[in-house]
Structures are given as C-alpha cells and as structure tokens.
Image (cartoon, rainbow, N blue to C red):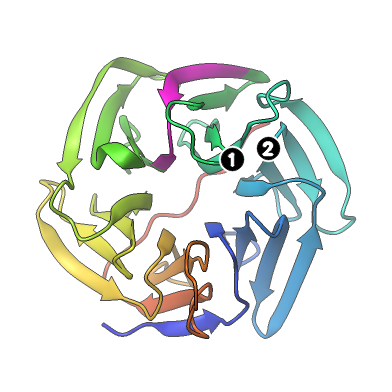
C-alpha cells in the first residue's frame, strides 16, 4: 500500500516514533538534528536539545522519558524543562543513544551505539525502578526493541547481524535465558531497523535501504509490506484513535541527493490492530 506523508518535515535521521495514548498525538525525533517533534492535528511542535536525542516513553500527559546521548531524563513538554534521571554512558564521548521503547512492566529499554557506528561500541540497557542495568554489551547498531503483547518476551537486533533475536522476560520484566533467533533477515532487501509488535502478535519492522515496513505473522511469515518514497525507513509505530494507523520515520542520512519525500514521517491505514505504548514508571 502506498504511503501518505503524515509530516513532510525532513529529518536527517528520523527515529523513535511514539503515539501517546492519552494525548492522542505522535512524537518522533531527528537524532542528527537533536530535535523532538510532535504533531497534534495540524499543529507541529518541536524542541531543540543540545545533544543527540533518539527515543522516548510516555510517563503522563505532558512528561516523557527521553533518552539522549549521555542521560535518561524526564522532559516536560509543557514547560520544556528536563529532570535528570541517570547517566547513559555519559563518560563515553564516542557513543549516543539509539532505539528504545517502554516495556509492559513500566521499564524502558534503550540501546547505545558509536556515533560512527563503530563495531561493538554500544550496548542495550534496561531502566527500571531507578536502576539502569546493562543487558547486552558489544552491540554495533541496536534496533527493533519491542515487546510481545503477552508481556512474556522482548525482541531486539544488532542491525549488521541481520537477525532479530527474542528473549523471555520474568515477572519483573528482566530477560532470562539466552536470546534466540526470531527472524533471520539475511535475504531481506534492507537492514533491520526499528520494530513494533501489534496487538495480535504480528511483528512490524522497518528495512533501512529498502523503503518499506514489513509485517510478519507470529511464526515469522511475511504478511504485508508497506512501501514509502524514502529508501531509509527507520522505525514504525501504531497509533490513531483505533491504533490501526501505521506510522514510520525515515532518514536522509547517507543519501547524496535525497528526494523531497525522504526524511519525512509516513502513515498507512491498516486492518491490523496495534497495541498502546506502555507507560514508563520512573
């Protein structure tokens, strides 16, 4: 299905789309531009930061947990004020945050990576009850952080491996056991980027370099492909009043002569049910 341009603002590296289930609006980031965007109806708001920002989870109607290159912080969209929660590799000037998402237990998973995508420079962490714990070290490009609607497992990828892994979660939301391959995308036309689960257990992943978001059944079978006029698709999110609109961010990064639609944020009406994004309990 052809994409609609939800917002034409060109992002160098669009990421982290978040449909706020209480405020009924879409947030997203331009990592390279160090900006947070929000579209509420016809109104577009933006906030400029002094370092890279990449992902968020909602805390209440006005506050977001925002991941930056050096910290996790509570950001109030009414006042523009930030409250420091904890450092995020703040002693390492070579890395920044990347993909992240709130989990069903009120925690927040966040990946880090080298600013030049240095091999193994990053990691994946979980923040919960005031504690930031490193889960997986030596990650190059963390992506596809997402949670099955039954709350019993999480998925993630290190993009260069072209494999999406799945790991079981305990009752408190911490991973248990060894992650196993859920999707092998070695033959896919692009690299696995951001991903989200639908309410029915379907899995939706953006393919960097392939200009699409692909849906997979719970057994991994491809069931749908939503194409966009931007090769570098970065991350999907379900939203809208009935959670059946699929949104996705894109990027102009790495493109010598990007078309006007590249870097935009896109949408598609679907028959697939999304799940509401989980609330972060800081």
Residue for badge 2: 69
Q: Secondary structure under badge 2?
A: loop
- The residue where tag 1 is placed is 115
- Residue 54 or residue 57, whichever sits in front: 54
Of the two numbered discs 1 and 2 in the rendering, the one whose residue sits closer to the viewer: 1
Q: Are marks 1 and 2 in contact (CB under 8 Å)?
A: yes
- Marks 1 and 2, how far apart at CA: 9 Å
Task: Tell me: 92 left or right of 269.
Answer: right
Q: What residue do we see at 76% from left, 67% from top?
A: 46
Circle 1 packing at 10 Å, graded few (<14), some (14-19), many (20+), is: some
Asked whether residue 3 appears in the rendered view, the answer is yes
The single residue placed furthest to the top in the displayed view is 177
Q: Residue at x 64, y 31 (%)?
A: 94
In the rendered image, the vertical position of residue 86 relative to residue 40, given as above or below: above
Residue drawn at 16 percent across, 48 percent down: 218
Residue 81 coordinates in the image, percent (x, y): 89, 48
The segment highlighted magenta reads 132-143
User: Magenta stretch: residue 210 in it?
Assistant: no
Identify the mark at residue 183; answer none if there is no mark: none
With respect to residue 240, does 238 lie above or below?
above
x and y percentages locating residue 209 in the rendered image:
33, 63
- Depth order, front residue of 272/132: 132
For the C terminus, which image quadrant?
A: top right
Question: Which residue: 26% across, 32% down?
Answer: 166
């Amino acid at each position: 299905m052809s994409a609609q341009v939800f917002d034409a603002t060109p992002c160098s590296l669009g990421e982290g789309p978040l449909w706020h289930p209480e405020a009924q609006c879409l947030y997203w980031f331009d990592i390279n531009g160090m900006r947070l965007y929000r579209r509420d109806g016809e109104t577009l708001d933006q906030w400029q930061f002094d370092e890279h920002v990449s992902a968020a989870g909602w805390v209440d109607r006005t506050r977001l947990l925002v991941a930056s290159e050096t910290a996790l912080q509570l950001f109030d969209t009414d006042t523009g004020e930030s409250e420091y929660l904890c450092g995020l590799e703040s002693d390492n000037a070579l890395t920044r945050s990347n993909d992240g998402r709130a989990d069903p237990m009120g925690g927040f998973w966040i990946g880090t990576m080298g600013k030049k995508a240095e091999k193994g420079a990053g990691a994946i962490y979980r923040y919960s009850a005031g504690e930031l714990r490193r889960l997986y070290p030596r990650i190059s490009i963390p992506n596809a952080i997402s949670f099955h609607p039954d709350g019993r497992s999480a998925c993630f990828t290190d993009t260069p491996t072209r494999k999406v892994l799945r790991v079981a979660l305990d009752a408190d939301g911490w991973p248990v056991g060894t992650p196993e391959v859920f999707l092998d995308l070695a033959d896919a036309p692009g690299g696995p980027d951001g991903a989200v689960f639908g309410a029915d257990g379907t899995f939706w992943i953006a393919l960097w370099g392939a200009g699409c978001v692909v849906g997979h059944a719970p057994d991994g079978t491809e069931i749908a492909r939503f194409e966009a006029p931007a090769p570098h698709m970065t991350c999907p999110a379900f939203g809208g009043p009935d959670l059946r609109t699929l949104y996705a961010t894109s990027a102009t990064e790495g493109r010598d002569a990007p078309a006007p639609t590249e870097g935009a944020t896109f949408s598609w009406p679907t028959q697939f049910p999304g799940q509401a994004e989980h609330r972060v309990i800081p």
